[in-house]
Structures are given as C-alpha cells and as structure tokens.
Image (tube, rainbow, N blue to C red):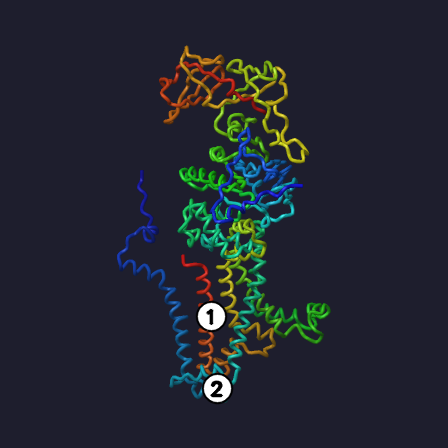
Amino acid sequence: MTETPPNPARGFLFGQRLSRTGHWVRSAFFSGPAVLWLTFLLLVPLLLIVGISFMTRGEYGGVEFPLTLDSYKRLAGFGELGFDNLYPLILLRSLALGAGTAALCLLAALPLAFFIARLPGWWRHVGLTLVVVPFWTNLLIRTYAWQILLAPESGLARLAHSLGFVAAGEPLYPGVFAVMLGMVCDFLPFMTLPLYASVEKIDWTLAEAAADLGADRCSVFRHALLPQITPGLVAGLVLVFLPATGQFVIPDLLGGAKTAMLGNVIQQQFASSRDWPFGAAISTAALLLVTAGMWIYLRRGSKEESPL
Amino acid sequence: MVAQPKSASFLFSGSAIFVTRKPVQHDSQGSPSRGSVPAIEASGLVRRFGHVEALAHVSLSIRQGEFFSLLGPSGCGKTTLLRLIAGLDLPDAGTLRIGGVDVAEIPAHLRPVNTVFQSYALFPHLTVRENVAFGLRMKKVPPAQIAERVARVLALVQVTGLEDRRPAQLSGGQKQRVALARAVVNEPQVLLLDEPLGALDLKLRKQLQVELHQLQRRLGITFIHVTHDQDEALVMSDRIAVMNDGRIEQVDRAEVIYERPRTRFTAQFIGSCNLIQGRVTADDGQTVSIESPMGPLRIPRPPADPEPRNLMPQGGAEPLAKPRCQETRRLSPGFAVAAAIRPEKIGLTRAGECPSESCVNARIEGLVYSGAETQYRLRVGGQTLTAVVLNAARHEPFHPGETVICSLPETALVLLDD
C-alpha cells in the first residue's frame, strides 16, 4: 500500500498549528487586499471630505485655511444673507424621497416576494430572474424610456387622462408621479431579493399554530409571519432608503430638473460652483443624519428581537 | 335539537385551581360514558392529494371526555384527519361535526379546538409566558385574567421559573410542556395532539405518556392523539382507531384492539402476531373449525360487537364497515381463512405435561433471550411460530432442537378478515 502524500493545499489552509508570526502573515495575505482597498479608497477619502468641510473656499475655487464652521451654518440656513430654508428643505426633500421610495417598494415587494416564494420549484427561478432583469439595462436608458412612455402624446398618458386618473392638462411627466414610478422600478429588486430570502424560509406551521390559537388573517400575518421576515424587511429598507436618498438622476430626468436634490446640490458644489467645503459639509451632514437614523431604527429593532 | 357540550371553563373559575372532575364513569364495557353529543362526528370524510386518497371515506364518532388515539403507520392519513378537525385543511367530501355543530364553514381560528403540533411550533420571538398567553390575547381576554390563567396552566404542566425564556432556550421536554400549556390554556372542547412525544427520548416519553393521561383525566377535555407508536396508544388511550391507507381498520378499546384484532393489518401492526392459514371444515355459529398446517383448530367466535354503534354514523346513512366474518356470517367448508395468536399466549411445556386438549408437538429452532422473557422460534407441522415465555423459573429453559409440547388456547385464537 502506498502512503498518500499530505495534500499541500490542505496543509496550508487547515489543520496546521501556526506560530504567532505565521498567523499574522496568513491574515495579512488573505485580508490585506480588502483592508488596503477600504482604507485608501473609502476611509481616507471620507476623512478628507470631513476635513474639507471645515475649511474655507479659496479665491479660485481651491481649499484654504482657516478652519471654520461657516459651511455648516450655511447648510442650516444661516448664510450671509440672513435665514434661508433652501438647504434644510433640500435635505428634507431628499430624505422624504428615500423614505417614500422605501415605503412604496415595500408595498410592492411584499406580495411579490410571497408570490415568488410559493411558486412551484423551477418557476421560482424564473420569477427571481425577471425581478433582476431590469438591471441588465443601464439606468439612464431605463429612465429615458419612462420619459417616452409617460410623454403627453403616449398611449399611457392618454389612457390615464381618459380614465380620469389625471386631470386634463396635467401631464404624467414630469412630476412627482413620474419620479416615484422611476424610483420604485429602479429600487424594487433591492427590496424584493432580501425579502424573498426571508419569506422563503418562513416556517408555515407557526402560521397554522397562530390560526389554531384563534388569530384571524391579519393577526396571523402580524404575529406569526412578520417576525419571521423582519430581517429581510430591515435589510431591504436599508438597501433602498440609503441609495434612494442620494439619488438625483431619476428626479432630474423625470421630475423636470426643477427641484434640487441632495445629490444634485453636492454635485453642483463640487463641479460648477467650485465650493468644495460646502459640498463636503452637505455630504458629511447627510451621512451623519442617515447613519444616526439607521442606528436608532436598528437598535430599537434589535431590542425587540431580544437579547438572546 | 342538540345540547351544547359542556365547556371546560368551569375548570378555571372560582378559587380552586382545578375543580376535580367527577371520575370518568365507565359503563359495562369500561369506556367513559357517552355524553349526549359526540365530541367529534365524522362521516364519509374524503381528502385527496392529487391522485392519492389520503382519507377514503372515513367515518368516526369520538365521545366527550375521551382519550382517543389515531394509530397507524406514516402515510395512513391520521395526521390529515387531525388537520381536518383543526380546520387547517378542508375535506373534499363528507361532513364533520364538533360538539354537534357542523364546522364546514367555520375557519380554523373560530373552531373550539386547539392543537399541540409535532414540531411544537412555539413562536420563537415570544417568551414562554407570551407563547402561552397568545390564544387568550387573540380572544381579547382581560390582561389580569390572562396572567392568572397562564400562571395556573404553567404550574399544571410543571413549567415554572421558565416564563421569561424563549423557546430556543428550552429543552425538548420543556418545549413539549409549553406547547401543551399553550393549547390547554384556551380550554378547548377538543385537544388535538399530533405525535406530541415523537421527538423525545424514550425515558422522557414514558414519563410524559403517564402525565398526559393524568392531565386528560383531570381536565376532562376530549383528547385526540395521533401516533405511530402502538405502545403509546395502548398506554394512554380509552379507545384507539387503527388506520391504514386512508381507512379505519378498527375502532375499539385498547385491550380489544390487542386481544381481538379484526384484520390482518391490525393483528400485525399492533404487537407481534402469529398468522395461521387454514381452511374451514365446519362452522356451527359458535365455533369455527379449521384445518391448518399444524392440525385441526377450533376457534370460538367472539360475542357480537358490544358496541356496534361505534361503527355507525349518527345519521345511519351507510354502514361504516362491511359485515365481519367474525360476527355473523356462516362460513362454508373449504373457505380459506387466517387465524391469529399472540406469541405470549402460546404455552410451551415438556412432554407429559399437556395442560389442555389442543396440544401439538413442536421443535425449537432458535431462541432470543432478552432478560425478562425468552422468544422461541418453533416449527409446528409445516408452520413456523413465535412464542414468548416469561423467564419465571417455572421450568428449565428449552434448548434448540428440543421437542416440546405447544398448546394454543382456544380463546386466544382470533379469526381475521382478509
């Protein structure tokens, strides 16, 4: 009988007692690239932005000392020309857009996730693929497509008018309706996929147990199903709310470029206005606001989920 | 006009924790006395899954306050029947009455029954206390009363001190008790138990069998218990329905099911059984004589079914079982029949000590010693029989190859339907 040689790959990865240095070398080898990537492409730029937000705009659009809080004051509405609610409004409008998109996506994705999860075997994959298919087209192309579909001469617009959904003379596009439509279509997969992952794992005997104990349909959902899909629900809300808050292409193209969003304003400050400190201040403020909101929400959620 | 069944609510009223129920009255057959209305009355229930008939025309009547078991191998339809009663599934045909009320239009959450699920189905995000309180909360019982009743029922099933734990922090036996408490606290007319002890180890199972039985006696609620474990059914039940292939083979008290099985399936599914094939030589209505590989045998017919009502639906639409050859039908000579005898009923003695008239010589082919008893494999005529003898030191153990006298008491022989 021949003795099997030790598998080199296996010996390298597992079943080996490493020295302290060896352990460090191995950790650095495997996690080093990711750490470097995140440090230089995320953490450092982020700190730079935070730093710049406290500096002064230079004569020719550069960044200069002294350190100041002027940018934040301006953002809060206390600029050189007295109180102006322009920027607080933009901030609120963006948050509202994110929250609205997340809420509508949830309403649309919830039945969809249950529907797909209860499809027989192979059809489930078809359903999931159809959910993801829009991603295969560029966002700009999809958005322009909505412009054409919602244009006043289009069949869709005429149908909406003749059915009385929209008052005569009111266009479908541009407007809030068109923006929300575009946003929901764009972000629906981000809500559907995590939700589906939770719905698929639901233990339906819990629903039966709830019904057996006297819960009607609403209570069965509230008490037996909702707690089971909460993880997917939270993940979906975060995944939609965060990017939707900063989204500006869709509001621009479908909203008629009349209303400024967080995204547009930041882009404007860094590009045409060349006021980097102010742009940086808006970014930092938005980041802090959203992070704080999320933190409070998740902490409340995890408290309910019990400290096991 | 049907009288509404007594609710078990008196159990929780007044200061006494549990008013002891009048001891279950046994009639001459030893079964609990019948209430005016059966707790469950099924007639002609059919449930199909695709082309498979999970339930094929099942009719059944379960009395108030009875511990009733549905016993059968997996896939026999026993769980399907339980789900139909709970309202978690709907029959394709047939009617079902709970406490005299037709429940065809009553959804699960409004039925006066509660279920203990096989997997327990405790809500993982709720504590033990919240789990048990769930049913009462759904019924909008005042919170003070909920707290009181939950505490009481947790004490009853001996789960105290765990109120604030979650199901993931409980052992299997504790989960089982909590699941039981969660169902019982609602004071259902009928409690359904779907293999409640299936996931527990043997010792705990034995202990809980006794506890469940006592709990049922104490509460007086009708228990319907689904199991594939014959010991469990025999130990706990007032009556047992043996099910096979979507049909009910036999409904009777535990000892009748064991001593006088009607069908080959029942005889072989419950305990072990020797089957003897033979042909009828004479039938005088009292005793059937057959010729078998081990010689002539005389099998007395049992007395007529003491409770033929068991098998009749209340409306009397159709007989639930075809007439049995055990009962009335005269068998003509030459008719092929099977007789059954339990291994422990076969007597073994050494030559010269024959205790009864129907003795035959047998050769011992092998034995399995298992402490309290020894199981012998016998060769009698052309037939192999299994006999079980208690090791009570009444005689020296037999050895393989030895020739012994084997007696088959007439009263232990049962004629089976085929």
Q: Earlier in the sequence, mark 1 or mark 2?
A: 2
State the residue position of label 2.
A79
Q: Position of residue A239 (x, y in %)?
A: 50, 65
Q: Secondary structure at mark 1?
A: helix
Q: Position of residue B77 (x, y in %)?
A: 57, 38
Closer to us: B268 or B372? B372
| Of marks 1 and 2, the one in the foreground | 1
Q: Chain of mark 2?
A: A
Tell me which amino acid carries mark 2.
Answer: Gly
Vertical placement of B123 versus A284: above or below?
Answer: above
Tell me which amino acid carries mark 1.
Answer: Gly
Q: Secondary structure at mark 2?
A: strand
Residue A293 image label:
1
Q: Position of residue B46 (x, y in %)?
A: 63, 39
Q: Is residue B102 visible?
A: yes
The quarter of the image holding the C terminus of chain A is bottom left
The quarter of the image holding the N terminus of chain A is top left
Return the residue found at the far right.
Answer: A162
Is B288 placed left or right of A166 in the picture? left
Q: CA distance from mark 1 to mark 2?
A: 26 Å
Q: Chain of mark 1?
A: A
Residue A105: quarter of image? bottom right
